[in-house]
Structure formats: C-alpha cells, structure tokens
Amino acid sequence: MAKVPSAAISRLVTYLRILEDLEARGINRTSSEQLAEEAQVTAFQVRKDLSYFGSYGTRGVGYTVQVLRRELRQILGLNRRWGLCIVGMGRLGQAIADYPGFSEIFELRGLFDRDPSKITTTFRGLQVESMDNLPRAIAERRIEFGLLAVPADSAQAVADRLVESGIKGILNFAPAVLEVPKEVAVENVDFLTGLSRLSFFVLNPKWREEMIG
Amino acid sequence: MAKVPSAAISRLVTYLRILEDLEARGINRTSSEQLAEEAQVTAFQVRKDLSYFGSYGTRGVGYTVQVLRRELRQILGLNRRWGLCIVGMGRLGQAIADYPGFSEIFELRGLFDRDPSKITTTFRGLQVESMDNLPRAIAERRIEFGLLAVPADSAQAVADRLVESGIKGILNFAPAVLEVPKEVAVENVDFLTGLSRLSFFVLNPKWREEMIG
C-alpha cells in the first residue's frame, strides 16, 4: 500500500461531510471537481486521496453520491458505534458535552471529574462521576475514546489513567503533547495549533496556495 | 521552494512547544532524534520539515534549543501580536474565552453574540457586544482572527459577515465547511474530524504506523 499522508484522513472526513450535504439536498451525482471546489483542494487531490483506498467513480461520469458516502463511512469506521467519555467537566468539558456532534456513531457514555463538587451535576442525562469509576466504566460500557478536557498540567497524568484503564484513543483538548503507548491513538484538538497555522498562512499567502495537503 | 505539506505547519507548532518545554527545563541542546521522539514522528520527518524553511542545526551536534525556538517562532509569525475576537458566546464561546491559550501573541479584543440577552455579560474583562459592532471593532482594534463558535447552521452567514468586515483568518469551531475568498485563511477546529481520525486509526493501527505526516 502506498504511504498515506495523515492529512488525507482529515480530507476524507471533509468529503464525507460534503457528500452528506449533497445527499440531503437530493443530489445523486457528483465529481472530483465539485468535491474539490467545496473542500477547497484540487480535483487531483480528491482523486489521489480516494485512490489510496480503492477505485471509485467512473471517468467522465463521476461518483454516485450515496455509494461514495457509504464507502467513505466504511473506510473511516463510521458505520459502527464508538463509546466515548469526557474527562474534566469544567467549562470546556461542559461545552464539549453540549456539542451537537454526538450521535449514534459517537455515543457519550460517561463524564468524569476529580472534583467531588461536580459529581452531583448532570449533562445530557449523564451524571458526572469520580475518576475512581474510570476503569470499570471503560470496560463495562465499552468506552473506546476519552475526550481529555483537563488543564495542561494534569493532562499527562490523566492520559496515563485512561491508558491504564484500557482506552483505545484519546481526543486531547489540553495544550500538551501526550506520551502514550503506540497502540493508543491520540488526536489533538488544540486551537493554539489552529491559531499558529492561521498566523503562518496569513503571513505567507503565497505558500498557502502552493501547499500540498 | 519545495511544496510544503500543510501538516508540516502543525508539526512545527509541536516542535516549538517541545522546544519551549526543553528551555523551561534548562536544556540548551537537542537533536532531531529527541524532537522526533517527543513529537512521535521520525527524525527524518523533523529534519525534512525544518529543511523547507532553512538550514538549522549542525550534523552530529544538533540544535541550540533557544536558537531553533526563535527561528520557529519567526517562521510561524509568533514573534508578533495578533488581535482576536470570539463570535458566538454560548457555552462553547465561553469555554474558548476561558482557555489559557490567549497571551501576548494571541490577544482577545472582542466578544460578539447576536443574542441581546448576552450583551450585558463580561468574560476576561471584555463585555459581549452586538454583531453590529463587528466591522468597526475589527478595523479599530486591529482584530485579525475571528473564532467562530456559532451553531453549524449559521456558521456560513456569520463567516460572511466576518469576511465583509475585513477579517484575515477564521478559526472555525462549527462543524461546517466554510466558503471564503482565497485571501482569507480558515482553520477548522472540529472535534468530529478528530473523532473520525481516531476511528480510522484505531481500526487501522498498521496504517497509522505507515502514515506520513
């Protein structure tokens, strides 16, 4: 298999979102040109990203929206359910719990905080629990991903507890680089990286156009 | 100039964070191997990422932490000040305002919401303002980046207002693909992309190891 740039996975998510939007609008056919325009990449990039995973579409005819949508969902593992928990129920954890992104695919199954005063509160029908419940909750409720919303200075310690408890992936909202065993996946949702990228791209508009990925 | 993968910019931010951490710990010298280990990439990747921007370090000797840190700050445009505003002061906008990431580099200069009931509230010493103030605030307070924390269904309309008002970059927290003129930079901080990436990487651990970027 050809080496896949990690950024291609993010773009597949973008294409999937565009396809879902097209489908909601009753559109049945699309093209790499249309996907490219909406995703703000080149049509070549769209075709290349898809080519890592198989052969989709027909030259001169394009893609069937529903078929490509189903394929992308399968590639990304979004045709199944994942169990999630949030660790750290400060304002950030609360905003995450609020977010409309949870669904049948990403199901929130636990909220944890080390602060006993938070343990009586409820969000989205889930009561905040003590960190002591973490290992059992992860095993019994099949929680695969932990959303880490604790301050940067405790992020590594909490990540260690998630790993010991058998978590498979961590979505890290803390501005900290986590060290985890290589069998655990980590994705950082750190908006300082986003701000730094904006800073670079605003100062280097020409480079942005020449970027790949 | 060689084509720069967009993901390289994110990695530069990671290297910078590691260098800042090393400097805080009083460490003066580092190597591509050490940076690679902490950033969870290969040493070759570190050297390649840096090579897009110049020639750093000495073979067999490595890098001076302080020098490389300064170079990376300059490449990323983090040796200057940027003015920021948050648009949408629901729980998400409030959590963003709470975040400890704002600093001398990224300075919060305005909070906006269309809901008049929010306009009396204050976060971090800033009072929430009406959207009507947006164009004047952006011009007069030199606000360059807008942090978009509105629901997905109003994200494009609010982005349009930010663009009309002269914003240079948008950090988009809404799960929506924004269309903006190409001179405006957009970065998406959408945790559904992060969750989808976790899903893919957990299901494809071997691919993760073979990923580039």
Image (cartoon, coloured by chain):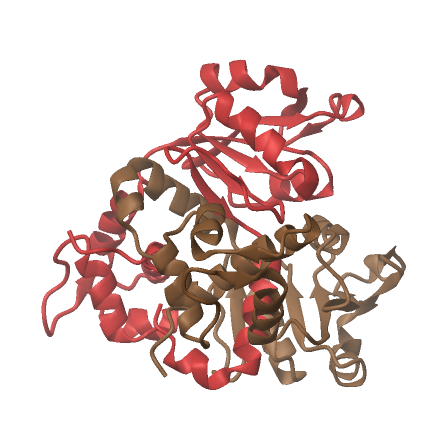
Chain colours: A brown, B red
Image label count: 0
Horizontal side, residue B210 vs residue A14: left or right:
left
**Residue at the outermost left position:** B59
| In-front residue for pair B164/A21 | A21
* Residue B119 image-quadrant placement: top right
Horizontal side, residue B102 vs residue A1: left or right:
right
Residue A157, visible in the rendered structure: no
* Quadrant of the rendering where the C terminus of chain B is positioned: bottom left
Where B209 sits versus A202, above or below?
below
Residue B99, visible in the rendered structure: yes
Residue placed at 28% from the left, 64% from the top? B27
Where B11 sits versus B32, above or below?
above
Report x, y in % for residue A8. Answer: 43, 65
* Residue A171 image-quadrant placement: bottom right
Report x, y in % for residue A92. Answer: 68, 51
Report x, y in % for residue A61. Answer: 47, 60
Where A147 sits versus B4, above or below?
below
Report x, y in % for residue A23. Answer: 66, 55
Residue placed at 31% from the left, 56% from the top? A212
Where A86 sits versus B112, above or below?
below
Residue placed at 56% from the left, 79% from the top? B202
| In-front residue for pair A33/A111 | A33
**Residue at the outermost front position:** A60
